[in-house]
Image (cartoon, helix red, strand yellow):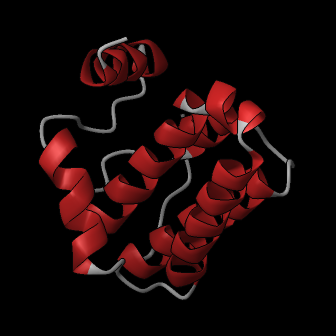
Amino acid sequence: MTDKEFENIESARKYVGDLIINVLTDRIVVREAIKLFPHDIKDESIKSAYHALIHREADEDLRYRDLLYKDEQDNYLEGLARILQKGQELPKNIIKNYNKYYREIEINHSGLFKIVMKKLCKFLNV
């Protein structure tokens, strides 16, 4: 969990964009980025970015087998990160796509990874 406080939602978005870039450049692993995500932020863009990272972690075996998929997913995450690094809101269609599957999931750091993976596996019928 992070103790980082943010002046406004734009600074929180910029921080999340930096976290995603750090994952993409192998400075930190997804699990560490998830722990560092801002807690108690109700911003839909931040929630969507959070779930995009969860998908990356869940797709690790597919990313290993399919390099084209890996590149596409990384490019997508980089696009999200660049928007967030400017402090901007993600496009509504991206937020809508994540909200329709994850409305009930809140960013909760206690037992977070286990809970999210369980829900993701249920969603993917694994």
Residue 41 at what x, y percent from top left? 31, 55
Which residue: 76% across, 33% down? 64
Residue 119 at what x, y percent from top left? 29, 20
**Visible in this render: residue 8?**
no
Name the one closer to the observer, 69 or 29.
Answer: 69
Which residue: 13% across, 35% down? 104
49 is higher (above) or lower (below) than 14: above
Q: Quadrant of residue 90?
A: bottom left
Drawn side of residue 107 relative to residue 34, left or right: left
101 is higher (above) or lower (below) than 95: above
Residue 33 at what x, y percent from top left? 63, 43
Q: Quadrant of residue 7?
A: bottom left
Name the one closer to the observer, 28 or 57.
Answer: 57
Name the one closer to the observer, 16 or 63.
Answer: 63
- The quadrant of the picture occupied by the C terminus is top left
108 is higher (above) or lower (below) than 79: above
**Visible in this render: residue 5?**
yes
Drawn side of residue 36 relative to residue 99, left or right: right
